[in-house]
Amino acid sequence: MTSEDQEREFKRLEVFAYKNLKKNSIISIADGAIFAIGSGMLPVSTVIVYFISHYVHSNTLIGLLTTLNVLLSNSPQILVAKKLEMLDSYKEYFIKVALLMRLMWFLLAIDVFVFATTNELLFVILFYLIFSLQGFFASFANITWFNLILKLVPERQRSKFFGIRSSIGGLCETFGAFLMGRILRLLHFPYNYGLLFLISFLIMMISLYIASMMIEMSIKKPKKEVDNKHYFRNMFLILKEDRNFTYYLLSVLFIGALGKMPFGFQTIFAKNSLSISTQHVAIATTILLFSQTIGYMLWGIIGSKYGFKSTLLISALMFLPAIYFTYLMSSISVYYLSVALFGIAQSARNVNESNMAAKLCKDPLKQPSYIGLRNFLMGPFFAFNSIIAGGIIDTLGKNILFLISFSCMVLGFFILCFLVRED
């Protein structure tokens, strides 16, 4: 397949994407809204952790559950990148892996109903196994879905699309959290959680059915068989040959991981300094969801006008006062302010971090490799972020954590601002 043939395919795809943009956008936004209701019922850091703490009393093992889920939701994406580069269309494969991801919630419901009261050891083992598999299949589904969206939504429309989709998703996620509270009152523990997993599974299946309605055009790709050893070697050569992308990854490391270390302890710091109640935590959660929803709309507008990099730079600057107020924690109002600033700043990264990675890739056929490599390398830092922060607090103290975090955020900002180029 010649370069001229590829160019014609990309032009044909662009015409198709604009022709079907409205329909595919509406379908994807509806899919995201329904999925957000289901996922909003199952926040890992609160509902899942609270539930498993009734059976597991080791803080290390409880932390391991969330760490494994984050790690497996990111790093394995590198395993499917090669397959995606060879596929002429993504939707069929996405439906398969997204179905497997959703089925894990159904299996967790079965695990609760069958073993939670009869065999607690087997229940916990199965829970950790199934929940880890949920993260694993989610990694495959996420990278496939994102590459499908890159194909269906033209670059100039993506920031606006993700902004609208994420804003509506944020509101629906809040509604899902409201439903979760109602569902947990319907049955006695632990069966109320089994019911919660089951209902969430059914809601997510509706979202998958809606997603299957998207219209995708197959494009011809060069069929070059490359063994796994050479493929992964070539993938890591990206770091050496594409310095722009390497600098971008460094900015993600310093801003998106190390710079954000204190935020995992916002509520803990507020509890220790201000003796906050569960009502204060509930208000802070609402502020976080609301500020992220506002942020999604804001960054969608800015990103579509000024590019993805501008949103990430402004976001990094907003993290700095959020870090300061988290350190200060002198009143409930300061606690709420730190949460709001974090929510707005983080929403920019939620919307445009992967978009930026895809845009830095000059060859559209290599986008799965770029995204998979980014998540493979950054996944461990995202997963162990809280553990690293906790270790710094325990050994060096809280002040050192904030000093390291603030310094990393500033360093990441300068790397992104002066070393990363966005066309």
Image: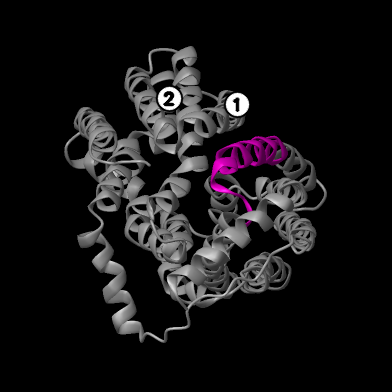
Report which quarter residue 256 is drawn in. Answer: top left
Q: Position of residue 124 (x, y in %)?
A: 55, 68
The tag on residue 270 is: 2
Q: Callout 1: few (<14), some (14-19), or many (20+) C-alpha neighbours within 10 Å? A: some
**Of the two numbered discs 2 and 1 in the rendering, the one whose residue sits closer to the viewer:** 1
Q: Looking at the magenta stretch, what is its main secondary structure?
A: helix
Q: Residue at x 47, y 55 (%)?
A: 66
Horizontal side, residue 245 vs residue 101: left or right: left
Q: Which residue lies most toward the front here?
A: 4
Report x, y in % for residue 148: 60, 61
Q: Is residue 135 visible?
A: no
Question: Which residue is more in the foreground, 336 or 47?
Answer: 336
The residue under label 1 is 294
Q: Is residue 167 magenta?
A: yes
Q: Residue at x 37, y 85 (%)?
A: 226
Residue range highlighted in magenta: 152-174
- 130 or 250, nearer to the observer: 250
| Number of marks | 2
Q: Is residue 30 left or right of residue 125?
A: right
Q: Identify whether 230 is placed above or below 138.
A: below
Specify which label sits upstream in the sequence, 2 or 1: 2
Q: CA distance from mark 2 to mark 1?
A: 24 Å
Residue 127: where, in percent of width, then height?
Answer: 57, 68
